Image (cartoon, coloured by chain):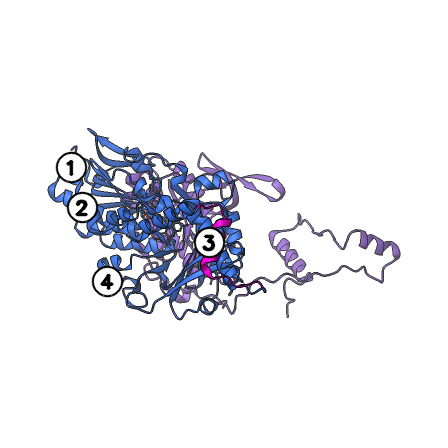
């Protein structure tokens, strides 16, 4: 390897200061490596869609004990709702826990506002000794004899060298493509999320959602919310605001000529949602892509001199019940850092040594989870699960509860009649039941 | 040639969120930046700097303002200096100016001081002129262009209604520049990395040879902040004492009366100043002498 001036040579260059990048930089810096963390935004988090539930509390707790005491968190999640919607009704499954891990340390999940949270996390990496540089857009990778040896920043004399480059530049990773590790995505593999943060008095939030102190709730919505676009919606409580949004598969948005913000407006006007957001004031609006196809989108994860982590590697579990990206981003970032540390010990940065990444990902349960749920995305993104069944459930409940002088039907005949009236064939229904089971049960 | 540039650390207006419930600015979300007019002043200073010249940047502000001075160093400024003192509670332009003037004197006084014309936050536009008063130097404000010609500065100034004025000032001088004249150059990667941990010299009151008493001016206290209220509409009614013609004319003009003013051309500056004061008294803007 050629030598470069010391101030331009790092052990590890991490690109992107999202949860993946900051976690990777933090761990590598703690191991005593010379780490550079590059972020294109004016500050870490500036470019990140704000408002999310972070389910990685236990992971972060290993790095920074009782991290929630110093981090900008909003509320810890101890209620989760899954609602099936028709245009006018909603049936919800309500999960509440005062149990260990939900309402007590280390907690299961926290709502966070990304601009604040990402900034804090990057500051932790900086405190651990990483050199954090913002307003630095990475344009390309640098190669020597086929090995990736650094990156080029879009500035004068922007070449900077690192023994290992960790690409954490988010969904549709420019770097993974430049390195030839990732292909272009198809529109059906990507979803577009549009999100709003709506300001609301904390007292009203506690009242309206039956919360005490810093408890929080996360709602996921399936069914007619996105009309015939494949997708779903969510609503989370922050301290003095709500994060809510709609996620729609890019290909079906295009096909149905639907604009995401129209869906968001419709969502907010739904009779089950409108009372929750009433009186709130819009604070922020943002849109961002989500890699939805899980395992199928996984790029090659390493090459000579480079590793890919987080959304850049497709590690985002967006499958109906789950919308988890930050925790996997962090886990994969840590696994990448462990790999870089190992390579530095061996002083060998070839793909053969970096292949240890796969083992590290498995140890951190990233690849195992994605393999386990590999059937979920394509099926969950299908029209029947995203739109038809949830709507049938909601309509079915409406019929069960309606008292209008007609004879009461029992649930089974009612279901039978609804299936008969719909476009679903009984064989298909059985196959779908099997698929749901395969996707989520075993 | 030694050039000084005054950089103000200001909130980025695009990040300001007013809490709809209290009417207060949500301080946790505000990001700060270099005042835009000062950014072009810095770029123009860097372009003007001869090979044996220097550009030094000054800021009166809290520790966070170091970042902005580091950015200036990354862009090519030669030295930076920050003024702050924890005893400084609230800063009025006159205090800021006094501190800036003292800071300029720390080293040999420069030949030229470039300021922005207005800051985007308080924006009183008074600092360049007050600084001129302190240093007893000439000042040109609302400057859109300048050129150094055999030791004299030729400046173009923007006047009201699109008019321009050309003037000349002798150095040392202070210029207050309009914003948006030029963009600040982008720093190279090595420079950006170099300045990240460059310490910025800090001068407090003591180092500047000032005492808190020197900065004592009648203070203004903030009592309450209220969300804006729409102004009450006043219905126009014509003066019933006037003749029919006068009333019709009033109705036709919907109560709009042109502003009347007077151009003072004759007299000594003192006499002109007296005339202005008399005019303001007559209009009720100044109290009558007791
Ligand atoms: C912590 C803090 C508290 C404050 N409290 C008050 C307060 O209570 N009351 C009040 O009226 N104002 C307060 N201010 C703002 C006060 O500092 C004025 O903004 C300042 O005196 C300049 O006035 P201006 O913005 O109107 O400047 P302008 O005259 O509009 O600015 C013109 C140019 O002067 C230069 N300049 C102005 N300020 C500085 C600076 N600080 N450092 C370097 N160059 C500068 C810049 O080149 C600028 O473009 C406070 C500021 C701070 C940081
Ligand atoms: C609407 C919506 C809601 C979501 N809700 C949740 C949720 O509730 N819970 C959850 O866990 N996940 C959620 N996700 C997914 C989650 O946001 C991502 O999985 C997660 O942010 C991935 O982290 P990351 O670090 O890999 O990438 P990112 O967070 O995307 O960070 C990438 C960083 O790299 C920077 N970057 C990109 N390109 C360059 C470049 N060329 N040079 C320099 N820097 C660059 C970016 O500015 C950014 O800071 C949601 C996503 C969306 C869109």
Question: In this figure, which residue is indicated by the disc labeled 2?
Answer: A359
Q: Chain of mark 1?
A: A
Q: Residue furthest left?
A: A346
Q: What is the crowding at mark 1: few (fewer than 14 residues within 10 Å), some, or many (at least 20)?
A: few
Is there any visible trace of residue A146 in the rendered image? yes
Q: Quadrant of the N terminus of chain B?
A: top left
Q: Which residue is mark 3?
A: A416
Q: How far apart in space, not on screen, are marks 2 and 3 (Cα)?
A: 48 Å
Q: Is residue B181 left or right of residue A301?
A: right
- Cα distance in 3D space between marks 3 and 1: 57 Å
Residue A120 is situated, as x and y percent measured from the top left of the image, at: 32, 56
In the image, the chain rendered in blue is: A
Q: Earlier in the sequence, mark 4 or mark 2?
A: 4
Is residue A159 at least partly visible in the picture?
no
| Labelled pair 4, 2 in contact (Cβ < 8 Å) | no
Please check the rendered image and state whether residue B58 is part of the magenta-colored stretch, yes or no.
no
Q: CA distance from mark 1 to mark 2?
A: 13 Å
Magenta region, residue range: A406-425
* Label 4 neighbour load within 10 Å: few <14, some 14-19, many 20+: few
Question: Mark 2: few, some, or many residues within 10 Å (few <14, many ≥20)?
Answer: few
Label 3: which secondary element: helix
Q: Which mark is residue A352?
A: 1
- Both marks 1 and 2 on one chain: yes
**Mark carried by residue A65:** 4
Which quadrant, please, contains the C terminus of chain B?
bottom right
Q: Chain of mark 4?
A: A
């Amino acid at each position: 390897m050629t030598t470069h001036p010391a101030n331009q040579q790092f052990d590890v260059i991490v690109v992107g200061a999202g949860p993946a990048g900051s976690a990777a930089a933090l761990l590598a810096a703690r191991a005593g490596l010379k780490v550079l963390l590059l972020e294109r935004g004016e500050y870490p988090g500036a470019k990140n869609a704000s408002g999310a539930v972070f389910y990685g509390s236990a992971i972060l707790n290993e790095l920074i004990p009782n991290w929630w005491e110093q981090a900008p968190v909003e509320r810890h999640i101890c209620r989760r709702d899954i609602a099936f919607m028709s245009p006018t009704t909603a049936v919800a499954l309500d999960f509440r826990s005062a149990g260990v891990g939900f309402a007590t340390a280390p907690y299961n999940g926290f709502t966070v506002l990304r601009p604040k949270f990402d900034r804090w996390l990057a500051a932790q990496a900086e405190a651990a000794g990483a050199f954090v540089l913002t307003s630095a857009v990475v344009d390309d990778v640098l190669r020597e004899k086929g090995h990736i040896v650094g990156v080029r920043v879009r500035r004068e004399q922007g070449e900077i060298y690192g023994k290992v480059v960790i690409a954490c530049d988010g969904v549709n990773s420019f770097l993974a493509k430049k390195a030839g590790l990732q292909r272009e995505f198809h529109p059906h593999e990507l979803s577009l999320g549009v999100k709003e943060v709506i300001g609301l008095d904390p007292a009203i939030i506690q009242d309206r959602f039956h919360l005490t102190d810093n408890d929080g709730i996360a709602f996921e919505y399936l069914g007619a919310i996105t009309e015939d676009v494949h997708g779903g919606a969510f609503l989370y409580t922050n301290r003095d605001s709500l994060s809510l949004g709609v996620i729609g598969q890019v290909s079906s948005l295009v096909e149905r000529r639907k604009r995401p913000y129209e869906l968001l407006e419709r969502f907010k006007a739904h009779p089950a949602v409108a009372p929750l957001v009433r009186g709130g004031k819009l604070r922020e609006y943002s849109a961002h892509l989500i890699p939805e196809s899980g395992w199928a989108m996984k790029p090659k994860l390493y090459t000579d001199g480079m590793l890919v982590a987080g959304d850049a590697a497709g590690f985002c579990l967006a499958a109906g019940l789950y919308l988890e990206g930050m925790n996997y981003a962090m886990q994969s970032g840590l696994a990448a850092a462990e790999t870089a540390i190992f390579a530095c010990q061996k002083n060998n940065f070839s793909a053969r040594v970096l292949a240890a990444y796969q083992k590290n990902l498995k140890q951190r349960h990233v690849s195992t989870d994605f393999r386990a749920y590999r059937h979920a995305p394509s099926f969950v993104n299908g029209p029947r699960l995203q739109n038809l069944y949830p709507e049938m459930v909601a309509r079915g409940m409406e019929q069960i509860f309606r008292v209008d002088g007609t004879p009461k039907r029992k649930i089974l005949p009612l279901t039978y009649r609804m299936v008969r009236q719909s476009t679903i064939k009984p064989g298909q229904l059985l196959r779908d039941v099997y698929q749901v089971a395969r996707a989520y049960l075993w | 040639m030694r050039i000084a540039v005054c950089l103000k650390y200001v909130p980025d207006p695009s990040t300001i969120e007013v809490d709809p419930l209290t009417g207060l600015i949500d301080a946790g979300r505000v990001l700060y930046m270099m005042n835009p007019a000062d950014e072009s002043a810095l770029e123009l200073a860097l372009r003007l700097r001869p090979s044996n010249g220097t550009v030094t940047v000054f800021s009166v502000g809290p520790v966070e303002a170091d970042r902005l001075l580091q950015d200036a160093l990354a862009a090519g400024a030669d030295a930076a200096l920050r003024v702050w003192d924890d005893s400084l509670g609230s800063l009025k332009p006159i205090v800021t100016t006094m501190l800036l003037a003292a800071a300029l004197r720390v080293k040999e006084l420069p030949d030229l001081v470039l300021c922005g014309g207005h800051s985007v936050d308080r924006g009183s536009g008074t600092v360049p002129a007050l600084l001129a008063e302190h240093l007893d130097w000439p000042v040109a404000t609302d400057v859109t262009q300048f050129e150094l010609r055999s030791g004299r500065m030729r400046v173009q100034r923007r006047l009201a209604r699109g008019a321009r004025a050309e003037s000349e000032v002798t150095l040392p001088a202070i210029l207050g520049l309009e914003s948006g004249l030029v963009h600040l150059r982008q720093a190279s990667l090595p420079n950006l990395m170099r300045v990240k941990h460059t310490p910025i010299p800090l001068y407090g009151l003591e180092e500047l040879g000032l005492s808190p008493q020197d900065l004592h001016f009648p203070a203004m206290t903030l009592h309450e902040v209220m969300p804006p209220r729409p102004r009450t509409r006043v219905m126009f009614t014509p003066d019933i004492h006037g003749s029919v013609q006068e009333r019709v004319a009033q109705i036709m003009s919907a109560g709009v009366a042109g502003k009347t003013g007077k151009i003072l051309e004759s007299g000594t500056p003192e006499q002109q100043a007296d005339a202005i004061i008399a005019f303001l008294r007559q209009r009720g803007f100044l109290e009558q002498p007791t």
